[in-house]
């Protein structure tokens, strides 16, 4: 079997055989398919198995694999431009498009990944406020920057401990942990540390404890506390930006963060990231301000061309969002009805085209503790069943399922039919 041969040989040259841990399928105890081709809503592995893809490269492929407009933009650009490390017109086009079509981004800085965007946003917030401490929420993932890899301590909520080997305690001493969707928790943090908090960073719709949307009242309280204490509010929209709505989750909640981070969709499938916000905040960045951040490949012309093609297509074709919302609602309803018929205790959390299926009898999943309490062994069995039925979905309950523009009603029906056979 070609899949197994490639994966086993990969283990000799790459840790675990992968370049990002979740790809090893460790949580579901299945050998991962080795993907060789993507076309629209479908992917094909080295053994020539075809799957309906509900991962979409973990979110970026909202237009489907190898969208012709994105591919043509890449081809047309790389004939004459691969990398310069210098200003280009195409980076201006993408920056201008984002700043003029989003409500809350006056200026933007391009980077190369979501991790780079979030860590840079935090440094900018510290530079603006002159403070050191930041607040993040248990279960929210903002990349592998040391200051984010924190686990809540066993006693006092706000005393963090390293959440990963290789992270010294001094690297996370200024990171405070609060509970997602818990107003009292964040009030306690501000009551104790308010004058020292530079920023609060949050996924307004979490996609890394599974899909868990923030409650509106919680985000409103968070916004109020930040304003009252002179702290900046950072929305990590790496996953939700241009996904749950073109203008991101902040447009659904009606809240304007001080800084927003982007990645995934904005690169058209190529490595990309960015952070942007109000002009008076962004002008703290070098070369006009004191906060230094740089990158040789930032604003790479091929990436900018792919991103510009993807975002202009999404902006000019709003029916895409109508389509994926319709399919998302149909899929959620179908899964819930099938589970009820089978007596399966599940909760389906969804925001637009993002969704997670939790196996739990609790009736809701609103934070990390509730997500951790779900039956991950049942999810693993469910995942293997779905994969064997040609449905490619996240190999971990703590990830999201994504619907894209190229998915059809027939694809959704096949997913629901597979659920009914579980």
Image (cartoon, rainbow, N blue to C red):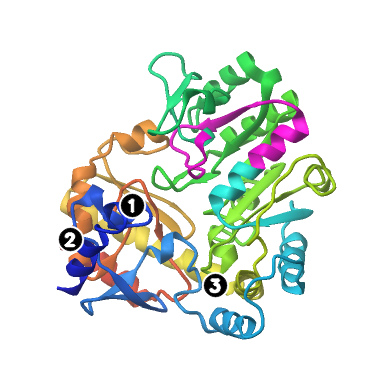
Name the element at disc 3.
helix
Which callout, 1 or 3, points at the residue further toward the start of the chain? Answer: 1
- Residue 235 percent coordinates (x, y): 62, 44
Horizontal placement of 198 versus 290: left or right?
left
Mark 1 touching mark 3, by CB under 8 A? no
Horizontal placement of 92 versus 253: left or right?
right
User: Which tag is nearer the camera, tag 1 or tag 3?
Assistant: 1
Give the residue number, with chain letter if any, for mark 1.
22
Location of residue 422 with respect to 348 vertically, above or below = below
Name the element at disc 2.
helix
Disc 1 to disc 3, C-alpha distance:
29 Å
Give the residue number, with chain letter if any, for mark 2.
385
Location of residue 370 with respect to 298 vertically, above or below = above
Let me know if residue 108 is in the magenta part.
Answer: no
Disc 3 to disc 2, C-alpha distance:
30 Å
Q: Which residues are magenta?
A: 121-146
Q: Quadrant of residue 112?
A: bottom right
**Which image quarter holds the N terminus?**
bottom left
Give the residue number, with chain letter if any, for mark 3.
320
Mark 2 touching mark 1, by CB under 8 A? no
The label number, if any, that marks residue 117 in the structure image: none
- Residue 139 percent coordinates (x, y): 43, 37
User: Which tag is nearer the camera, tag 3 or tag 2?
Assistant: 2
Along the line of sight, which residue is nearer the eye, 113 or 217? 113
Name the element at disc 1.
helix
**Which image quarter holds the C terminus?**
bottom left
| Number of other residues with Cα within 10 Å of mark 3, as a class: few under 14, some 14 to 19, many 20 or more | some
Horizontal placement of 117 versus 336: left or right?
right
Disc 2 to disc 1, C-alpha distance:
18 Å
């Amino acid at each position: 079997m070609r899949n197994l041969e490639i994966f086993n040989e990969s283990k000799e040259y790459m840790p675990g055989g992968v370049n990002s841990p979740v790809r090893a399928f460790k949580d579901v105890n299945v050998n991962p398919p080795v993907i060789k081709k993507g076309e629209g809503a479908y992917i094909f592995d080295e053994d020539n198995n075809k799957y309906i893809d509900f991962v979409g490269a973990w979110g970026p492929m909202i237009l489907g694999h190898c969208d012709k407009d994105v591919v043509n933009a890449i081809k047309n650009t790389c004939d004459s431009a691969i990398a310069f490390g210098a200003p280009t017109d195409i980076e201006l086009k993408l920056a201008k498009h984002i700043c003029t079509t989003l409500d809350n981004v006056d200026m933007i800085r391009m980077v190369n990944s979501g991790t780079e965007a979030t860590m840079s946003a935090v440094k900018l917030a510290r530079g603006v406020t002159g403070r050191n401490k930041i607040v993040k929420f248990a279960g929210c993932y903002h990349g592998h920057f040391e200051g984010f890899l924190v686990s809540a301590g066993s006693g006092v909520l706000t005393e963090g401990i390293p959440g990963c080997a290789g992270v010294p305690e001094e690297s996370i001493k200024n990171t405070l942990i609060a509970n997602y969707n818990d107003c009292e928790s964040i009030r306690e943090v501000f009551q104790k540390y308010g004058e020292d908090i530079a920023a609060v960073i949050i996924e307004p719709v979490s996609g890394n404890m599974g899909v868990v949307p923030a409650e509106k009242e919680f985000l409103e309280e968070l916004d109020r506390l930040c304003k009252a204490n002179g702290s900046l509010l950072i929305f990590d929209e790496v996953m939700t930006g241009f996904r749950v709505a073109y203008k991101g989750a902040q447009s659904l909640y009606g809240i304007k963060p001080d800084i927003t981070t982007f990645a995934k969709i904005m690169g058209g499938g190529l490595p990309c990231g960015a952070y942007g916000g109000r002009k008076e905040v962004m002008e703290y960045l070098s070369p006009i301000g004191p906060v230094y951040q740089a990158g040789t490949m930032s604003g790479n012309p091929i990436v900018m061309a792919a991103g510009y093609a993807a975002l202009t297509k999404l902006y000019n074709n709003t029916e895409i969002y109508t389509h994926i919302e319709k399919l998302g609602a149909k899929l959620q309803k179908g899964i819930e009805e099938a589970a009820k018929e089978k007596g399966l205790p599940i909760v389906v959390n969804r925001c637009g085209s993002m969704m997670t299926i939790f196996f739990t009898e609790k009736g809701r999943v609103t934070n990390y503790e509730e997500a951790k309490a779900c039956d991950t062994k049942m999810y693993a069995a469910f995942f293997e069943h779905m994969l064997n039925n040609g449905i490619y979905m996240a190999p971990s309950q703590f990830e999201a399922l994504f619907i894209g523009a190229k998915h059809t009603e027939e694809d959704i029906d096949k997913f629901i039919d597979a659920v009914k056979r579980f």
